[in-house]
Image (cartoon, helix red, strand yellow):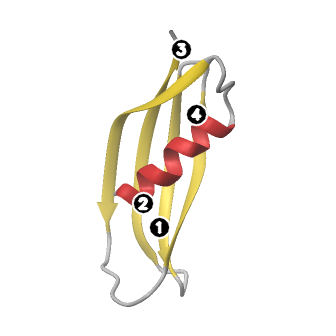
Amino acid sequence: MSLVESVGSPASMLVIDNDKFIVRGITFSANHLRSVKNRNVTATATFIHKGRTTHLIEIRVEDDQGKLISTCRLTNIILPKV
C-alpha cells in the first residue's frame, strides 16, 4: 500500500499549483488479488476524477509479466497552503 500511496499522491501534485496548494490523502481502498515473490511490480496511476478540491485516482499494480496484483483507489484532497 505504501507503493500505491507513493504513486497516487505525486500524481495529484503534478497537476496542481504546488506554490498555492498541498495534497493530503483522505481515503484509500485496496483489493489484493495475488501475491508476488521475487518479481518486480509496476504501479500505474490513472485519474478517475480531477476536481478543484478532490482527486480520485485508480492505481493498478502489475507484476513484470503484466498480471494484475492489486487494484487500489486513492482520494486526495487539495488544500490551500496557509
Q: Amino acid at mark 4?
A: His
User: Where is residue 17 drawn, in percent x and y?
Assistant: 69, 24
Q: Is residue 36 above or below residue 56?
A: below
17 to the left or right of 53: right
- Specify the amino acid type for callout 3: Lys
Residue 82, compared with residue 22, is above or below; it is: above
Residue 61, numbered label = 1
Where does the N terminus fall, quadrant-wise?
bottom left
Distance CA(mark 2)–CA(mark 1): 9 Å
Q: Nearer the viewer, mark 2 or mark 4?
A: 2
Q: Does dot 2 land on a helix, a strand or a loop?
A: helix
The residue carrying mark 3 is 81
Tag 2 and tag 1, C-beta contact below 8 Å? yes
Residue type at mark 2 is Leu
Q: Nearer the viewer, residue 45 or 38?
A: 38
The numbered mark, 2 or 4, whose residue comes first in the sequence reads 2
Res. 45 mark: none
| Residue hosting label 4 | 49
Q: Residue at x 47, y 67 (%)?
A: 61
> From mark 3 to mark 4, how far is it between C-alphas?
22 Å
Residue position for label 2 = 3
The alpha-carbon separation of the residues under discs 4 and 1 comes to 19 Å
